[in-house]
Image: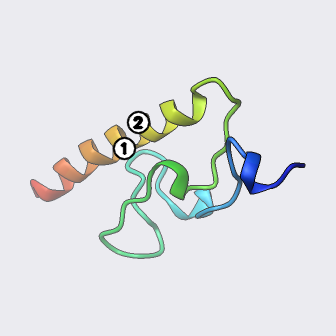
Amino acid sequence: MAGLKKAEACRGGVDTRQVDPYSLQSTVRENLWIVGELLDVTGLLGGYNLHWAWASGMAAGRALALFAGR
């Protein structure tokens, strides 16, 4: 309740229903991948948000590599 000055994680971002859960590609906009804190995903403190940022980036990167190879 202390506001953004003391926030360690913020809510908000792109609705997760608007991205493919496996590739993280937007289902609304073609050729757009959405990862990390751009998505409305909030985890517990202690590295979960950092893990999500790295893991989602890796998943999207792999999906994009497959997409680009078509």
Residue 66 drawn above or below residue 38: above
Q: 35 and 25: which one is in front?
A: 35
- Identity of the residue furthest to the front in this view: 5
Marks 2 and 1, how far apart at CA: 5 Å
User: Callout 2, which amino acid?
Assistant: Trp
Quarter of the image with the C terminus is: bottom left
Picture residue at 46% right of the left edge, 41% below the top: 53
Q: Which residue is at 43% across, 42% downward?
A: 56
- Image position of 11 with respect to 49: above or below: below
CB-based contact (under 8 Å), mark 2 and mark 1: yes
Farthest bottom residue in view: 29
Q: Which residue is mark 1?
A: 57
Q: Give left or right: position of 29 versus 8.
A: left
Residue 8 image-quadrant placement? top right
Which residue occupies 41% across, 76% down? Answer: 29
Residue type indicated by callout 1: Gly
Q: The residue tagged with tag 2: helix, strand or loop? A: helix
* Image position of 21 with respect to 16: above or below: above
Most foreground residue, 3 or 18: 3
Residue under numbered circle 2: 54
Measured as percent of width and height from the top left, residue 57 is found at 36, 44
Residue 3 percent location from the top left of the image: 81, 55
In the image as oriented, which residue stretches furthest toward the top? 46
**In the drawing, does residue 51 fall left or right of residue 15?**
left
Q: Which residue is found at the position 48% from the left and 48% from the top?
A: 36
